[in-house]
Amino acid sequence: MQTVTLIPGDGIGPEITNSVVKILEKAGAAIEWDIQSAGADVAEKEGSPLPDRVIESIKKNKVALKAPVTTPIGKGFRSVNVQLRKSLELYSNLRPCKNIDGIKTRYDNVDLVIVRENTEDLYAGIERQIDEDTAESIKIITRKASVRIAKFAFEYAVKNNRKLVTAVSKANICKLTDGLFLNCAREVAKEYPNIEYKEILVDNLCMQLVQKPEQFDVLVLPNLYGDIVSDLCAGLIGGLGVAQGANIGEEAAVFEPVHGSAPDIKGQNKANPTALLLSSIEMLKYINQKDVAQKIEKALYKTIKEGRVLTADLGGHSTTDEYTQEIIKNL
């Protein structure tokens, strides 16, 4: 039995969490949940959207499944996701992007993985107001973080039978920061002679992704480019509703969907739990419950391929509860 920290989040978070917990339970996952609330409602009661008890729970259990948490834009508290990554040193953001049979997209041959550095770059949050008309943000790139994320990308490629790692930068303009990132990737690549290594500028990458996404395998990127490109790639496979994510460090891992909390449909039984379910499947693989993971994956893919019971964003007319029950039926 594995104890996992469960963060239901806010907005549609509790609804899709309830869905996923039911599916995992029916599939026979050996999990005991340590439920920890976080987000805007918690901030009002406890003075922080991410109380220390949540961090301590994840440190203790080593693994967490997290639903979306609302982050105010331009004001309010700092992103809970950013705080989690910083506090737990979750240095790698892993975003597999693969077509699912039954979800119509412009592409049918996407199968790539984004490995995004998760701790520095402009996300370090080092900003200052110079005067009322000028603000400044400082971009931090270090050798330690760049080597670490490059090694993660190559190790992932080895363990998952991937053949190519492509380092992404804008080193022609950001010669010192992105240049350092690129040099570190080159040095690490020498340690993995059986994995092909390439480089590409981020703007060219975006063009190539919408022309021939099948040419890419594993992409390793600094934080900001990784954030943008990972959402672009989610668009290639059907949108954020089917985009899974994981934040992984040496001591802990947090699995989560990458979409927002969608407060506009909160409590309406409309939410699509697929992304959180895909994230939970990756979590099950991570904690060596691979048989259960495969069982759920097959049931999910069957449900989507059949196309009879789907939520509105997947092209159907079913409720969250109906979609959940259909997946359970297909287990």
Image (cartoon, rainbow, N blue to C red):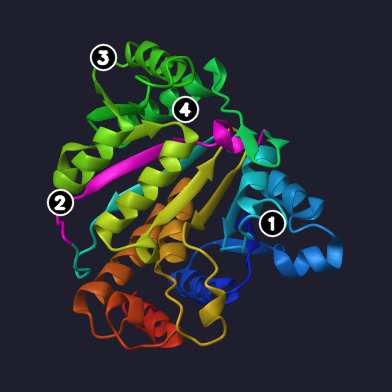
Which circle marks residue 75 in the picture? Answer: 1
* Callout in the foreground (2, 1): 1
Nearer to us in this view, 148 or 172:
172
Q: Residue at x 63, y 37 (%)?
A: 134
Which circle marks residue 109 in the picture? Answer: 2
Q: Which residue is mark 4?
A: 149
* Callout in the foreground (3, 4): 4
Count neighbours of disc 2 (C-alpha within 10 A) and say few if under 14, some if 14 to 19, many if 20 or more.
some
Query: How far apart in space, not on screen, are marks 3 and 1 (Cα)?
Result: 47 Å
**From which residue to which does the magenta span run?**
106-126
Q: Earlier in the sequence, mark 3 or mark 1?
A: 1
Q: Is residue 195 visible?
A: no
Q: Is residue 32 visible?
A: yes
Q: Is residue 98 left or right of residue 156?
A: left
User: Could you say whether the residue bearing mark 3 is in a helix, strand or loop?
Assistant: loop
Q: Earlier in the sequence, mark 4 or mark 1?
A: 1
312, above or below 212, in the image: below
Query: How far apart in space, not on screen, are marks 2 and 4 (Cα)?
Result: 26 Å
132, above or below 261, in the image: above
Q: Which residue is mark 3?
A: 193
Residue 293 drawn at (x, y percent): 39, 59
8, above or below 49, in the image: below
Residue 308 drawn at (x, y percent): 24, 85
Inspect the image, locate mark 4, and give the three-letter code of the amino acid beneath it.
Answer: Ile
Query: How far apart in space, not on screen, are marks 4 and 1 (Cα)?
Result: 30 Å
Count neighbours of disc 4 (C-alpha within 10 A) and say few if under 14, some if 14 to 19, many if 20 or more.
many
